[in-house]
Image (spheres, grey):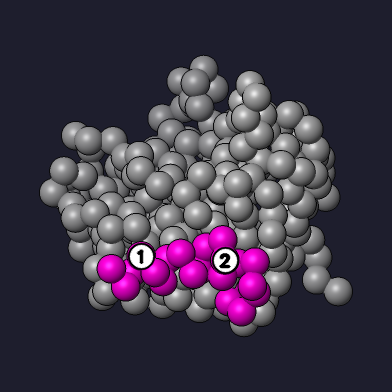
Amino acid sequence: MTETILKVEGATRRFGGLVAVNAVSFEIGKGMACGLIGPNGAGKSTMFDLITGVRPVSAGDIWFKGQRMTNAPAHARSPMGMARTFQIVRLFRGLSVLENVMLGLHPRFADGIIRALLGGKARAAQETATRARAMEMLDFVGLADRADARIEEMTLGQLRLVDIARALALGPDLLMLDEPAAGLNDAETDNLGVMLERLRKQGLSMLLVEHDVDFIMNACDRIVVMDRGTKIADDVPARVRTDPKVISAYIGQRAAHAAH
């Protein structure tokens, strides 16, 4: 039986009278790639925020690696093995690609007062280890040759890869990607798919929000579908694709839109 790495139980989030997420439950097994899809306003990004602690749940529970994380602050979840990217890439202008990935490693090493008290050799060793790990991740996403480039010089597709490299740098147990293929051309999307397949084969658990239905169906072992804050399907891709509720709420609408 596959070990459960993430368990969402009846997660609910209210904003005043609006219920953005309505009693949603699902699980992700260790080494599983799970997709989260649905129309705009379905509550997908809000669900990401609940899982990572960016927003508190109004009701329900979040369990990660067997521990109840419902009330844990966001900064406590990353060191436990959660990493995420954002729909709008959040990188630091004025810094190099390598420096941005290195910043993603700060939860792993001593910081603040402790870092200031480190001896010269210890601090140098930390810097060397951070740089080596960041370069390893840039090599994985195919951007090692752009390590010294400024963020402002990168294309959108490259920026998304930098964001993924930064998330991977911590060696997470669960990687959460919010619309990683948004704005990418066909070649960049294909490259992203190959990279995610490599991560799946390495046994990394993933949760993906994505509007490219074909991409997410190919990238994931299981698909959760939300509509207006409620879960309407949770199954393998082949069955989700033919589910009448999903076709009515999402896939059919996207096909009709694409036809125009």
Magenta-colored stretch includes residue 242? yes
Query: In the depicted view, which residue is nearer to us: 260 or 64?
Result: 260
Q: Which of the image's four quarters has the N terminus?
A: bottom right
Query: In the depicted view, which residue is nearer to us: 122 or 60?
Result: 60
Q: Is residue 1 left or right of residue 185?
A: right
Within the image, what quadrant is residue 255 found in? bottom left
Give the main secondary structure of the magenta stretch: helix
Query: In the depicted view, which residue is nearer to us: 93 or 182?
Result: 182
Q: Position of residue 246 (x, y in %)?
A: 60, 67
Magenta range: 240-260
Q: Which residue is mark 2?
A: 248
Q: Does dot 2 land on a helix, a strand or a loop?
A: helix
14, above or below 35, in the image: above
Outermost residue, top side? 113
Which residue type does callout 2 highlight? Ser
Magenta-colored stretch includes residue 176? no
Residue drawn at x 70%, y 71% is 235
How packed is label 1: few (under 14 Cα within 10 Å), some, or many (20 or more)? few
Q: Position of residue 244 (x, y in %)?
A: 64, 72
256, above or below 58, in the image: below
Question: CA gap, disc 2 to disc 1?
Answer: 13 Å
Q: Which residue is mark 1?
A: 257
Q: Which of the image's four quarters has the C terminus?
A: bottom left
Outermost residue, bottom side? 238
